[in-house]
Image: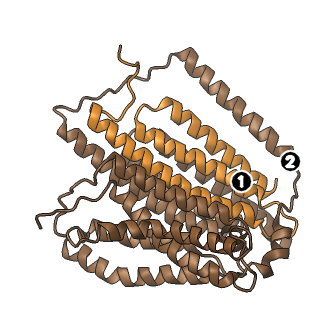
Amino acid sequence: MEAMIQPLGLALDGLLALTLLWLAWRVLASADLFKSIVFFIAFGLVMALIWVRLGAPDVALAEAAIGAGLTGALFLAALSRLRQGEEGMANGTHLRRANGLRFGAQAALIGLLIALFLALGFALLSLQNEAPGLSREVADMLPASGVSNPVTAVLLNFRAYDTLLEMGVLLLAVIAAWSLSAAPKEAVDAPGPVLGGFVRLLLPPMILVSSYLLWVGAYAPGGAFQAGAVLAAAAVLLLLSGRSPRASGWLGWPLRVILSLGLAVFIAIGLALTFAGRLFLDYPPDEAGNIILVIEVVATVSIGATLAALFAGGRPQQDKRE
Amino acid sequence: MTPAILYAITGIGLFVLGVHALTRRAHLLNKIIALNIMGSGIFLVFGALAYRTPNGVSDPVPHAMVITGIVVAISATAVALTLMLRLQSKTGAAELPEQSPE
């Protein structure tokens, strides 16, 4: 039986790899930007399948929700703003340059890239076929980590610094986007009855799924990032259906508090631990599970709000007149 | 050929395709998408190499780092897109000029 499954599995792997490369080619070669983005979303979904084949369901969830879903939504929103900007111009001052490279330069570029591929491939093939990496060390320390999903243990305990700095990166991204521009005042038409009703039906299950992913991350695939991405998707749907809380005062300091809460609580817990005589972010094994849960809950809310704010594309403008 | 090596080579292929598009496409949105494809290729190499464990259970440390990487990638993409839109509103085009104006 094993002998039958092995070649079948390898054939499936080969098919997925070829599909991925073909989709990447379609993404990069399409002349039409919209087509390119749609292929990019499909690319992300195939990528998620490959993560499952590689025994990484946590990464597959993150890839499908963030890599394919939210990144695709960001690209589509940027494209529609680009088009609006072009319409604003007199006759679209295109700098479309007829592919500026001469034949020699083109050939040199292709040659260089093939050499790069061969060099990296050679380096890869010279690696050992079996390498346990750090999996044994993680398995040994897992009982002291407070959770039983090894990926969550690495993210929030063993390498908590990574996640702390990542929350900082998210906050910095929002600050950068807000400093560069104000959110466009899109005249969102009143949503049709289908979208409006659909959003109303979909939001409660999405919040439920998000909470489930957050809770289950302690012992099964899931966690703060996947849960935050689902929350962000719910917020994006709300924004698309024109139900943004524009006039309600939500976009002032409450939004800023939510955006920075994840990082602030993370740092506060780290500092509290140093005052208790331990190292920064060195959780006591008995309390580690609870500490991780607290950090994950606030991180989920912050990640969701941050990703949604990045989708909105600039600092919120409050209508004072309303 | 093991699945790990197969997917790692696919990842290198994605990276190289991305570099090609990054240098050849003029439109900045194409360039940002190309950067994302390059990033996916790097994640795939990293994740595939984590699959080389003898007992068939992947190494969780690279997985956690790839999840971190995916989130950092979307943050960088969002800032890049905002910069692109800003450039368009200043110059009228979301492409880099061929030569810097004298």
> Which tint was used for chain B?
orange
| Crowd rating for badge 1 (residues with CA inside 10 Å; few <14, some 14–19, many 20+) | some
Q: Describe residue A237's horizontal placement relative to residue A50 as left or right.
A: left
B67 w.r.t. B92: above or below: below
* Residue nearer the viewer, A295 or A307: A295
Q: CA distance from mark 2 to mark 1?
A: 13 Å
**Residue occupying the point 19% across, 69% down:** A247
The amino acid on which the numbered mark 2 sits, given as a three-letter code, is: Leu
Q: Chain of mark 2?
A: A
Query: Where in the figure is residue A91, as x and y percent of width and height?
Result: 18, 31
Q: Describe residue A307's horizontal placement relative to residue A252 as left or right.
A: right
Q: Locate residue A59: give its quadrant.
A: bottom right
**Residue occupying the point 26% across, 73% down:** A195
**Residue occupying the point 41% across, 84% down:** A205
Please name the residue that numbered disc 2 is placed on: A127
Chain that is coloured brown in the picture: A
Q: Describe residue A170's horizontal placement relative to residue A243 as left or right.
A: right
* Residue nearer the viewer, A132 or A283: A283
A95 w.r.t. A71: above or below: above
Please name the residue that numbered disc 1 is placed on: B46
The amino acid on which the numbered mark 1 sits, given as a three-letter code, is: Phe
* Residue nearer the viewer, B2 or A267: A267
* Residue nearer the viewer, A20 or B34: B34
Q: Describe residue A282's horizontal placement relative to residue A126 as left or right.
A: left
Query: Where in the figure is residue A273, as x and y percent of width and height?
Result: 67, 74
